[in-house]
Image (cartoon, rainbow, N blue to C red):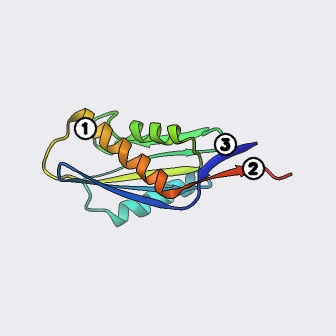
Amino acid sequence: MAYRTVKQPGEAELVIKRSRFIGRCFPVADEQEALRLLEQVRRQHWDATHNCYAYSVGVSGACARYSDDGEPSGTAGLPMMEALRRSGVTDALVVVTRYFGGILLGAGGLVRAYSAAAAAAVRSAGEVEMRECV
């Protein structure tokens, strides 16, 4: 069985209406590694307004979680998860860190910003196809 995952850690940054969105994507082997990397990003960006995330682990993405981290419900974590699913990769963690720029983006603006930052981070990480060796 073959599946696609990210090749290496990737990063992308967007500035939208003075808010800074830093997207990071990491390859992960399991949920514990995803949570460990998430904690590292949170420690690194302790002063950020939000550290939203989405991860999918397992050949079919059997273990998938996401969080809006205080953003309005459904405006960050779920759009990031959809960006992961659209890319077709699994065994990956995406974290988008937001530094608020003083201008409210509205629900639609947040969805677009988090989706774009997550998708850009996944593209930056590159993709690789994994195949089971027997």
Residue 21 image offset from top left, x and y in percent:
30, 53
> Residue 13 is drawn in which quadrant?
bottom left
User: Foreground mark, 1 or 3?
Assistant: 1
Seen from the viewer's position, the closer of residues 20 and 52 is 20
The residue that mark 3 highlights is 59
At a point 82% along the width and 53% down the height, the residue shown is: 133
Q: Secondary structure at mark 1?
A: helix
Residue 27, position as x, y percentages in the image:
56, 56
Could you say which disc has been placed on residue 3 in the image?
none
Residue 31 percent across, percent down from the top left:
57, 50
Out of 2 and 75, give the one closest to the viewer.
2
Q: Residue at x 36, y 49 (%)?
A: 117
**Residue 121 in picture, x, y percent from top left:** 43, 53
* Mark pair 3, 2: CA separation: 10 Å
Within 10 Å of disc 3 (Cα), the crowding (few <14, some 14-19, many 20+) is some
Going from the N terminus, do you reach mark 1 or mark 3 first? Answer: 3
Kindly identify which numbered label has been placed on residue 109.
1
- Residue type indicated by callout 1: Gly
Q: Which residue is mark 2?
A: 131
Which sits in the foreground, 34 or 15? 15
Position of 36 compared to 73: left or right?
Answer: right
Q: Amino acid at mark 3?
A: Val
Q: Are marks 1 and 3 in contact (CB under 8 Å)?
A: no
Categorize mark 2 by other alpha carbons within 10 Å: few (<14), some (14-19), many (20+). few
Residue 6, by quadrant, is: bottom right
Residue at (30%, 43%) from the top-left corner? 113
Alpha carbons under labels 1 and 2: distance apart? 38 Å
